[in-house]
Amino acid sequence: MGTDGTHLGPLQLAGERWVVGDDARPDAHWVELRPDGLHQHAPDSEGRLIPWSRLMTGIRLTWGKHSWDTNSRGLYTWGGMVAGSDRGWLHMTLRHPYEDDQLRFDRHARPYRAVDVLRLESLLRRLVDDGKPHLLGDPEWVGRAVAGLTGGKNSRLTQRSLRQAVTEALATAGPGTL
């Protein structure tokens, strides 16, 4: 498993699928975006699937050894890169039954730009809020959305600029096929 170089923070294209985290190491934790939902991969485990229909509000990314260590959520270097732990967490609220959950992923060796991580988080939140998280299971659609969000300066991190970037990326990506 490897990557072809297309990424947005911890989200990367690995072959023909999109994953959050480093899927290249045999001992790694990572999350695969599938047509049926988020699939958590872990060493020595078949993993677990969270269907798109269970996702609710509260999607966010944090960094730290433990999922409850949210003090690491906003550690960034002066150069605008994510700092801290080599472990990340995708937090979310699920329905049926209602519960808070988190999926672990291991970071890549490459650094993550703060703007890319915040744009990814904004994209995830927007899709859940709009009732369209299933679009993340369409690799071609995700590729178009990521292309619309990558690049640019590692600045302009206001909520307004993040919303605008996601709105433009969604318009570029189109309605999707799922």
Image (cartoon, helix red, strand yellow):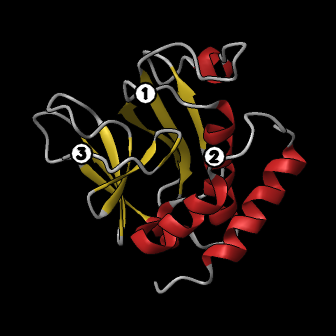
The correct choice, above or below, for 26 with respect to 5 in the image is above
Whether pointer 1 and pointer 2 mark residues with C-beta atoms closer than 8 Å, the reply is no
- Viewer-side label of 1, 2: 1
Q: Is mark 2 on a helix, strand or loop?
A: helix
Give percent across and percent down for residue 6.
Answer: 44, 51
User: Where on the picture, by quarter, is residue 140?
Assistant: bottom left
Local secondary structure at mark 3: loop
Q: Is 53 above or below relative to 107?
A: below
Q: Where is residue 135 in the image (x, y as percent from the top left)?
A: 51, 72
- Residue at image location 60% in from the left, 55% down from the top: 124
Q: What residue type is labelled 3?
A: Gly
Q: Which residue is drawn at 72% across and 45% down?
A: 152
Q: Mark 1 points at which residue?
A: 110
The residue carrying pointer 1 sits among few (fewer than 14), some (14 to 19) or many (20 or more) residues within 10 Å by Cα, namely few
Q: Which residue is drawn at 22% across and 37% down?
A: 24
| Residue type, label 2 | Glu
Relative to 131, say whether 163 is above or below: above
Q: Please state if 41 lies on the left or on the right of 65 as rendered.
A: left
Compared across the picture, whether 154 is left or right of 95 comes to right
Residue under numbered circle 2: 121
- Please give the count of numbered marks on the rendered protein: 3
Q: Which of marks 2 and 3 is nearer the N terminus?
A: 3
Disc 2/disc 3 C-alpha distance (Å): 23 Å
Local SS, label 1 = loop
| Along the viewing direction, whichever of 15 and 128 lies nearer the viewer | 15
Name the residue that disc number 3 marks. Answer: 2
Whether residue 138 is visible, yes or no, is: no
Residue 66 figure quarter:
top left
Which numbered disc, 1 or 2, marks the residue that appears first in the sequence? 1
